[in-house]
Image (spheres, rainbow, N blue to C red):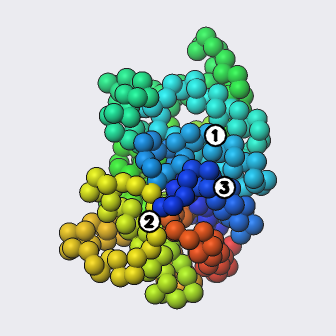
Amino acid sequence: MAGMTRFSMLDLVPVRQGDNVSTALANAADLAVHAEKLGFHRYWVAEHHGMAGIASAATSVVLAHIGHATSTMRIGAGGIMLPNHAPLLIAEQFGTLAALFPGRVDLGLGRAPGSDQRVAQAIRRNLAGGADQFPRDVMELQAYFAGDTRLGIEATPGAGEDVPLWILGSSLYGAQLAAALGLPYAFASHFAPGALDEAIAIYRRDFRPSAQLKYPYVMAGYNVFAADSAEEAQLLASSMQQSFVRLRTGQPGKLQPPVEGYYDSLPFQSQAMLSDMLSVSSIGTQADVERDLAAFLARTQVDELILVGQIYDVQARKHSLAISMAAAQALTAREPA
């Protein structure tokens, strides 16, 4: 692992119970300003559709909002679900963002639709090609940014803009594609940790240097719920736990207030599901977070961690981020130069 570990954050722009999208977007900008002051390297938002609890469906528009609120931190999509879009439109959107915020914009690409078939039909994309089309779409997008004249059309904005592409994944497929294209790779271990170690190994083994990247670069998602006491941290985590249980039982909705003793109240099957999905998590004090991050970094040797943590109370979420960064800085201070 070359250089110091970087720490970034992923925000799902949650719409809380009792709130609306306007409030969620205002909270996102406020959180981004806070993250920038704390020293987070990048702030990413993700594309989801048809979900009452997530306000980042128009991802590039949300990023313009975040970009105007901040001044130095990198901003980007983690990610854009490329099967939903014509590559030219994404080149134009992110070319616009790069023109507004030069040197700050990242574009992470996923192949999942980020929704279901009804939403896919509403987006009016023919998904018959599905995943088979994904590598071709990524390369077409690269060509638009490169200003490749063989396309017969120039992306304006887009052509000539420096927008680093990333491949996102939760399986071995993304690892293989990122390695073949010589792109940085981000693994969704914050909700699908099963294939993490194997995916990283395949990516590093098969990586081919490219114009964008000489050496493999891995980011992994990591959940953190940090507070001044372990009990409070457990309480904060219950909002996200409720979200996952509701999603798995077909009842998605807005982010719910925390519930005392929520995990212990669940049936065994739900506890097992949560333990599996959220196994890459730290819930506790700064000392707990420091210990857990150190163990994860020792295990994976990732170049960057992107922290996730849907917390209902806005101030508690900001405090959790501050504790997380304090733990990260303590770890970084111990890293060999």
Q: Mark yes or no: residue 205 visible.
A: no
Where, quadrant-wise, is the C terminus in this rendering? bottom right
Front residue of 45/264: it is 264
Identify which residue is drawn at 44% across, 80% down: 234
Q: Give how far apart the Cα atoms at labels 2 and 3 are.
A: 18 Å
Which residue in the structure is indicated by mark 1? 61
Q: Establish if 211 lies above or below 5.
A: above
Q: Give how far apart the Cα atoms at labels 1 and 3 are.
A: 13 Å
Which residue in the structure is indicated by mark 2? 256
Q: Position of residue 109 (x, y in %)?
A: 50, 41
Of callouts 2 and 3, the N-terminal one: 3
Identify which residue is drawn at 45% across, 41% down: 49
Amino acid type, callout 1: Val
Front residue of 331/68: it is 68
User: In the picture, residue 272 is in which quadrant?
Assistant: bottom left
> Mark 1 touching mark 2, by CB under 8 A?
no
Q: Where is residue 80 in the image (x, y as percent from the top left)?
A: 51, 40
Q: Give how far apart the Cα atoms at labels 1 and 2 are.
A: 25 Å
**Residue located farthest toward the front when viewing the structure as drawn:** 18
Which residue in the structure is indicated by mark 3? 26
Mark number displayed over residue 165? none
Of callouts 1 and 2, the N-terminal one: 1
Q: Establish if 98 lies above or below 152.
A: below
Mark 2 lies on a secondary structure that is loop
Amino acid type, callout 2: Gln
Q: In this view, does 202 lie to the left or right of 168?
A: left
Mark 1 lies on a secondary structure that is helix
User: In the picture, residue 110 is in which quadrant?
Assistant: top left
Q: Establish if 278 lies above or below 336.
A: above
Q: Where is residue 206 in the image (x, y as percent from the top left)?
A: 43, 46
